Image (tube, grey):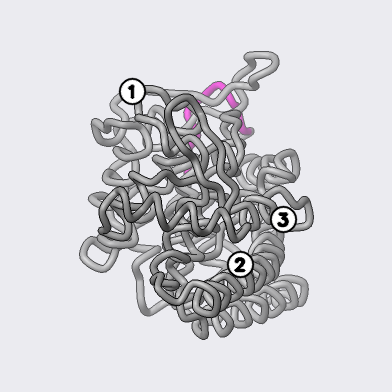
Amino acid sequence: MKFNPSKPHNLASLPPNLDCKTDIIWSALCDARAELAELKGYSSKLNNPMVLLTLIVLEEAVESNRIENIHTTVESVLKNQLKSESTRKGADKEARKYLEALYWAMEYQPKYSLLSRLIFGIHKILLGNSHGYRHQQNAIANKATGDVIYTPPPAPKINDLIQNWETFVNNPESDTNYSLIKCAIAHYQFEAIHPFMDGNGRTGRVLMALQLAQENFLDFPILYTSAYLSKRQSEYYSALKAVTEKGDWQQFVLFMLEAFKTQSKKTKEKLFKLDTLYQSLVSKLEKDHQKLNAQKIADHLFGWPFTTPAQYARALKVHSQTASKHLRELAQAKILIDYWEGKRHIFVYGALVDLYRDKNF
């Protein structure tokens, strides 16, 4: 039957009919797996992966929201996290929600696996509320013309499709040689099911990061594809469309394998730059500011490069006067830059902010 974008899609169950052993797929798979192995090996040697992970995830949050036409920057999110929830701009709040959703999922994934309870939890944090899977029909429209380009399966079929997705994703007996392809297939299927009225794309991209870790490609979720997808949206949507309309899984799988390969390489490069800067900061603090706790200060500044005495005091569990003294000392040493914003004295770890401003980062 010819695909009709205005009618609910008759989505087939998993696994799909895909020959994974073609030369072109095998070659792309080997390349992607090699880069992932490099990333896993490098990240496993880091002394402080979770500190560096915060910044990588925040960049992912910004890029994932950009795909949904929610625009901000890493610098804006970091700067405005000092403000109260009610005074932050909407795009910055959305990025913080993405960060919170992923960290919540990392904590509860061992307990819940990639099942509906975890999916609901992620969706609830991202959207601020969640009423479970949709109970009515929705559709995806072209933002420019308003024309319907895809109508997901009807609501009564969602539970069966999700259960099939859960079985496919959590099956430990699947061939590990092809489990990276499995991640790509699962991503398409979740987006095609479109189980929520809103937030499907962001939820699906969080799930993909978690699945890559669950398949043991990485020790923890540190590979994110949103930057790649954001820069190649038309190619991404074309590959999704090819599966939906023609059953062309090969085009989509090859696109996602290239995304995994490219982002693995870039993530390793970013981690190297972040870790180099982190180690440099710790060394400088230990050498020139021996009375200060170098490790705790570095951890704080990498999570809060825009900070205040109050925030510093909470993070390092010191008195506010002690916090002000420490920050002034670091500003005098040119490690931090300080300025006043109204009554707030703000201190900035400029070296980290400059790194994020660098177009080559």
Task: Give the secondary structure at mark 2.
Answer: helix
For label 3, the residue is 251
The magenta segment = 3-11
Q: Are marks 3 and 1 in contact (CB under 8 Å)?
A: no
- Percent of width and height locating residue 291: 40, 73
Q: Amino acid at mark 1?
A: Gln
- The picture quadrant where one finds residue 173 is bottom left
- Percent of width and height locating residue 268: 64, 72
Counting residues from the start of the chain, the first of labels 3 and 2 encountered is: 3
Q: Residue at x 75, y 52 (%)?
A: 358
Q: Is residue 75 magenta?
A: no
Q: Residues within 10 Å of mark 2 (few under 14, many from 20)?
A: many
- Main SS, magenta residues: loop
Specify whether 297 is left or right of 242.
left
Q: Nearer the viewer, residue 112 or 9?
A: 112
Q: Residue at x 46, y 51 (%)?
A: 304
For label 1, the residue is 136
Gap between marks 3 and 1 measured at Cα? 31 Å
Q: Residue at x 28, y 52 (%)?
A: 118
Q: Nearer the viewer, residue 317 or 38?
A: 317
Task: Give the secondary structure at mark 1.
Answer: loop
Task: Give the secondary structure at mark 3.
Answer: helix
